[in-house]
């Protein structure tokens, strides 16, 4: 009986894998059109079609383990502890200048069933995105490229690093701490940052950290696993007017954050190796002898 059971389990898994690959192939074109559609109507239509198709694919049993590698315009990240997977992407709005991020969190379930939490970007409805703790319905959107789990008092906190196309003149990079509450719902933001406010950082107290800078610039913010630090570029204003975020560019030095007792504590200068070169590789600074 055991051999028959394992054989049936193997066959079912193979069929499910084939099914989800076929569904991924079907939504690949619409995922591409979300970013590359020439008109807003084309982009929103593609976004709607893609979202419906993605949900259909995720309803496949044990879809959590599927990587969706072919969706090049959609970020798919697994938490290092395999607790959740997060999808994020962005839509260029009708003004052809600003963006709205889209996203969803898929939880890893024991029985392989789908538990999906949609994320709704409310950035355009607030002038103070840094000052509040938020739920999935009031998310400050970003395309995430890194998940960093950290423990404090036997609880896991996930720091999310993400990019926001923002508007016609600036980009943003967000550093967001998230955890799951007693109902397994995500909570975004909180009192996790210790630093002295200056002209280039959000005013304290802040619930999330952001760098806003000139759109044409390449500003690094990433996690270095060897140093166990989040490292980001120090900014300077080209016009000596730091309030004009569209003038902010990298100065050439790096700052950082170190996790200490449930807080990200600021380090004003990082002299060690530059962080992970896979992000913004053209800005890699090699360690001098």
Image: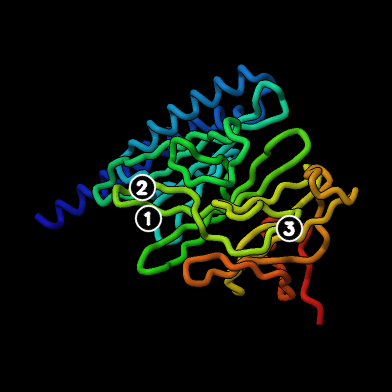
Q: Position of residue 221 (x, y in %)?
A: 67, 57
Mark closer to the chain start, 3 or 1: 1
Left or right position of 98 against 179: right
Q: Mark 1 Cα within 10 Å, few/some/many (few <14, many 20+)? A: few
The residue indicated by pointer 3 is 198
Residue corresponding to mark 2: 107
**Which residue lies at the image location 74% right of the left edge and 66% below the top edge?**
254
- The answer to whether residue 77 is above or below residue 254 is above
Q: Residues within 10 Å of mark 2 (few under 14, many from 20)?
A: many
Separation of residues labelled 2 and 3 (CA atoms) = 38 Å
**Residue at the location (30% across, 52% down)?**
182
Q: Is disc 1 in contact with disc 2, using a CB cutoff of under 8 Å?
A: yes
Choose top left, top right, bottom left or bottom right for residue 3. bottom left
Mark pair 1, 2: CA separation: 6 Å
Q: Residues within 10 Å of mark 3 (few under 14, many from 20)?
A: few
Q: CA distance from mark 3 to mark 1?
A: 36 Å
- Residue 32 visible at all: no
Local secondary structure at mark 3:
loop
Say above or below: 105 vs 228.
above
- Quadrant of the drawing holding the N terminus: bottom left
At a point 38% along the width and 38% down the height, the residue shown is 58
122 in relation to 11, above or below: above
- The residue under the point 32% across, 41% down is 115
Residue that extends furthest to the left in the rendered view of this protein: 1
User: To which residue does mark 1 refer?
Assistant: 83
Disc 1 is placed on an element classified as: loop
Decide: marks 3, 1 in contact (CB < 8 A)?
no
On screen, residue 50 versus residue 38, left or right, reads left
Farthest residue to the top: give it. Answer: 41
């Amino acid at each position: 009986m055991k051999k028959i059971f394992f054989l049936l389990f193997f066959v079912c898994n193979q069929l499910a894998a084939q099914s989800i690959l076929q569904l991924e192939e079907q939504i690949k074109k619409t995922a591409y059109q979300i970013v590359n559609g020439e008109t807003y109507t084309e982009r929103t239509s593609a976004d709607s079609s893609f979202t419906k198709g993605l949900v259909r694919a995720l309803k496949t049993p044990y879809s959590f383990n599927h990587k969706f590698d072919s969706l090049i315009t959609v970020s798919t990240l697994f938490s290092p502890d395999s607790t959740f997977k997060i999808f994020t992407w962005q839509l260029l709005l009708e003004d052809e200048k600003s963006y709205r991020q889209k996203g969803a969190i898929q939880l890893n379930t024991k029985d392989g069933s789908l538990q999906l939490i949609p994320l709704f970007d409310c950035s355009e409805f607030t002038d103070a995105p840094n000052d509040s703790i938020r739920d999935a319905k009031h998310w400050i959107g970003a395309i995430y490229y890194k998940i960093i789990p950290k423990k404090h008092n036997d609880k896991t906190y996930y720091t999310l690093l993400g990019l926001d196309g923002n508007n016609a003149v600036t980009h943003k990079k967000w550093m967001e701490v998230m955890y799951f509450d007693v109902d397994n719902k995500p909570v975004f933001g909180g009192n996790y940052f210790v630093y002295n406010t200056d002209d280039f950082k959000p005013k304290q107290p802040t619930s999330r950290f952001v760098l806003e800078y000139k759109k044409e610039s390449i500003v690094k913010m990433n996690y270095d696993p060897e140093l166990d630090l989040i490292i980001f570029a120090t900014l300077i204003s080209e016009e000596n007017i730091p309030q004009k975020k569209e003038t902010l560019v990298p100065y050439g030095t790096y700052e950082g954050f170190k996790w200490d007792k449930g807080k990200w504590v600021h380090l004003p200068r990082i002299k060690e190796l530059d962080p992970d070169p896979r992000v913004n590789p053209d800005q890699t600074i090699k360690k001098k002898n």
